[in-house]
Image (spheres, rainbow, N blue to C red):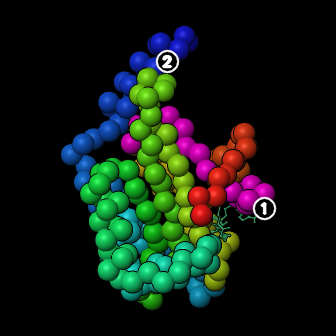
Amino acid sequence: MNSESSASRRMHVLQQQVDPSHTHEQVLSTNFTSSTQSGQVNLSLRLLQVDDYHKGFLQILGQLAVVGEVSFDQFKKRLEEQKKVVPQTYFTVVIEDVSKGKIIATSTLIVEMKFTHGCSRVGHIEDVVVDETYRGYKLGKRVIDECKRIATEQGCYKTILDCSEKNVPFYESCGFKKKEVQMRYDNH
Ligand SMILES: CC(C)(COP(=O)(O)OP(=O)(O)OC[C@H]1O[C@@H](n2cnc3c(N)ncnc32)[C@H](O)[C@@H]1OP(=O)(O)O)[C@@H](O)C(=O)NCCC(=O)NCCS
């Protein structure tokens, strides 16, 4: 297929898949059960909500990176900015252990609007973490699968991420393959 027809095919897929009537919150919400260290538990897979601040969302991110002091007001403002400034761009997927009211897994999809490849879209996955007491129960795979699904629904033609060498097998089992290298510039 030449590049022109491939670009127009992508545009067609994009037009078919992007439903502008879909609000941010309607994108997903699923309840399911999973075995964990504490036996079978009820879990809820959905997008991040403002009261997740009180359900340990920042604490679980703290198992991945330095979070620092983030007040409830700062958290709320950032979530509103993500939703309002560029709608349909930030999709933070969480899994809540409903019995404990605790966020136990998260992953964020960011949809980049490009000029290249016929004004295509590319998905970027960031901040993937499962609470250490829930690892090994396919919950990491579950949040990644949800990000992949939303990326497809949003018309992304590919989804990419950066990871450490030790997490390569995890992402390979989620269907990703190694490509190119990451470059970094430290602004501060
Ligand atoms: C990486 C992480 C998200 C994986 O979550 P998880 O829920 O334990 O992983 P899953 O149970 O969904 O694993 C899915 C698959 O990946 C494999 N896998 C997971 N971690 C792995 C590892 N470290 N090495 C090899 N394979 C691994 C599992 O065996 C499973 O394979 P299968 O589908 O063939 O059975 C979790 O370990 C974590 O939060 N780590 C700390 C934070 C981090 O490093 N995040 C990634 C930043 S890029």
Q: Residue at x 50, y 34 (%)?
A: 157
Do labels 1 and 2 touch, CB within 8 Å?
A: no
Q: Earlier in the sequence, mark 1 or mark 2?
A: 2
Residue 17 pos. (x, y %): 35, 36
Horizontal placement of 38 versus 79: left or right?
A: right
Respond yes or no on whether mark 1 lies under 8 Å from ligand 1: yes
Q: Residue at x 74, y 59 (%)?
A: 164
Horizontal placement of 117 versus 76: left or right?
A: right
Horizontal placement of 60 versus 183: left or right?
A: left
Q: Which residues are magenta?
A: 154-170
Taking the image as four quarters, which one is ligand 1 found in? Answer: bottom right
Residue 161 pos. (x, y %): 61, 50
Q: Which mark is residue 4?
A: none
Magenta-span inclusion, residue 53: no
* Mark 2, residue position: 6
Q: Residue at x 49, y 18 (%)?
A: 6
Residue 55 pos. (x, y %): 42, 84
Query: Amino acid type of disc 2?
Result: Ser
Q: Where, quadrant-wise, is the C terminus in this rendering?
A: bottom right
Magenta-span inclusion, residue 168: yes
* Mark 1, residue position: 166
Residue 122 pos. (x, y %): 49, 40
Q: Secondary structure at mark 1?
A: helix
Camera-nearest residue between 10 and 162:
162
Q: Secondary structure at mark 2?
A: helix
- Report the residue that reaches farthest toward the left: 21
Vertical relation: 65 (above or below) 25: below
Query: Amino acid type of disc 1?
Result: Lys
